[in-house]
Image: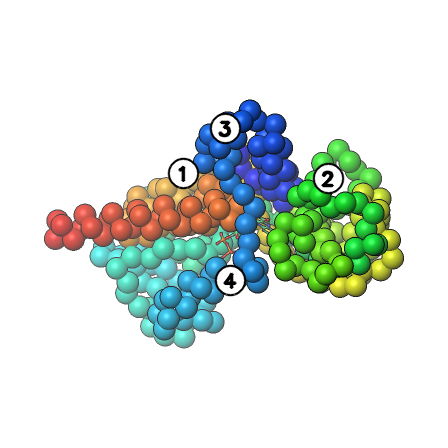
Amino acid sequence: ELEQTHGSLIGGMLRRMRARRTAPAGASDASPRTRRRPFSFRDGLAMLPEALARRLGTAVQYGRAVTRLVPTDGGVLVETGDTSPRPFDAALVTLPLYRLDGLLDVDEAVGPQPVPVTYPPVSVVALGFRREDVAHPLDGFGVLVPACETDFQILGTLFSSTLFPGRAPDGHVLLTTLLGGARRPELALAPEPRREQAVLDDLRRLLGVRGRPTLVRHVCWPRAIPQYERGYGAVKAWLAALEQHAPRLAFAGNYRAGVSVGDTMASGADAAHRLARTLAVDARTR
Ligand SMILES: Cc1cc2nc3c(=O)[nH]c(=O)nc-3n(C[C@H](O)[C@H](O)[C@H](O)COP(=O)(O)OP(=O)(O)OC[C@H]3O[C@@H](n4cnc5c(N)ncnc54)[C@H](O)[C@@H]3O)c2cc1C
């Protein structure tokens, strides 16, 4: 159930919602997977890392890119460019996979990353409308455009103001549309007016949108989501081998076991537990 492209992210959520609705009473909560619900926070997902950073206080150092990671016998040396390498007992690495190249001192026995992993661009276009300018009741999660619908340009649209409170003022709605991905990478990188027009053209046909939006926001993610393509198993095995050869190093992120926020958080928890176990065992045997 790996959600490789944004299309399949939205699709995965839509399918889950449908499965819950059609499952016999009691069955929809049978597994942790089917209990998952879309979630966000009052001011968006950024509230989560901001809250974690507040808890950590001065331990968090901003604006210092890691430039080198060197596993050592008793830990990991972390270099940030402006200072000499600092030794740590362990490092939980959450950089994107494409950043590891050239930054991580890899054990010769493990070798370099076996196959490249592509990260196609995705653009988000958030449009606000007066409620009366959208004919559709917006009584759901959103719209997924399957790849076979080649006369549409977008990947899908979330009914953000239906899903989460506080996303649009009274009498207005917010529609969040995704463009590009592996299907149409060039559209994600097109000039903003071109992206907006593509979204408006599709939303007019899909949702009966009329007139001009009252709000327009663009965000482009030039390297959005790693693609779990054929051969990806070799990348996962490579990461596991790196951790085996350098047990004070652990990797977490959307390239380990799924691209959703939930999967990514779970990979972080797994990595933290792995490191804690290693440190506990090493402390006992010292
Ligand atoms: C447009 C879009 C919409 C999405 N929508 C959803 C959704 O609706 N639901 C869902 O579940 N998932 C969604 N996803 C997927 C999900 O958000 C991501 O897969 C997940 O957040 C990735 O988390 P991460 O920690 O692996 O990577 P990132 O969040 O990319 O974190 C990597 C961090 O490393 C930092 N970094 C990079 N280089 C360095 C360096 N040299 N030194 C120090 N730090 C560095 C970066 O600044 C960044 O903060 C979406 C993704 C995109 C792009």
Q: Nearer the viewer, residue 114 or 218?
A: 218
Q: Looking at the image, is mark 4 or mark 3 earlier in the sequence? A: 3
For the residues marked 4 and 3, what is the alpha-carbon distance in whole angstroms? 33 Å
For the residues marked 3 and 1, what is the alpha-carbon distance in whole angstroms? 38 Å
- Which residue does the numbered mark 2 point to in the structure image? 145
Q: Amino acid at mark 1?
A: Ala
- Which residue does the numbered mark 3 point to in the structure image? 26
Residue at x 79% of width, y 45% of height: 136
Secondary element type, mark 4: helix
Q: Amino acid at mark 4?
A: Met
Q: Amino acid at mark 2?
A: Val
For the residues marked 4 and 1, what is the alpha-carbon distance in whole angstroms? 33 Å
- Tell me if 30 is positioned left or right of 156 in this view: left
| Number of disc labels | 4
Q: How is the image coloured?
A: rainbow
The disc placed on residue 47 is 4
Q: Looking at the image, is mark 2 or mark 3 earlier in the sequence? A: 3
Circle nearer the viewer, 4 or 1: 4
Secondary element type, mark 2: loop
Circle nearer the viewer, 2 or 1: 2
Circle nearer the viewer, 3 or 1: 3
Q: Looking at the image, is mark 2 or mark 4 earlier in the sequence? A: 4
Residue at x 67% of width, y 54% of height: 161
Q: Nearer the viewer, residue 35 or 65?
A: 35
Residue 158, percent from left and from top: 68, 48
Q: Looking at the image, is mark 3 or mark 1 earlier in the sequence? A: 3
Mark 4 touches mark 3? (CB < 8 Å): no
Residue at x 12% of width, y 49% of height: 285
For the residues marked 2 and 1, what is the alpha-carbon distance in whole angstroms? 33 Å
For the residues marked 2 and 4, what is the alpha-carbon distance in whole angstroms? 30 Å
Extreme-bottom residue of the structure: 82
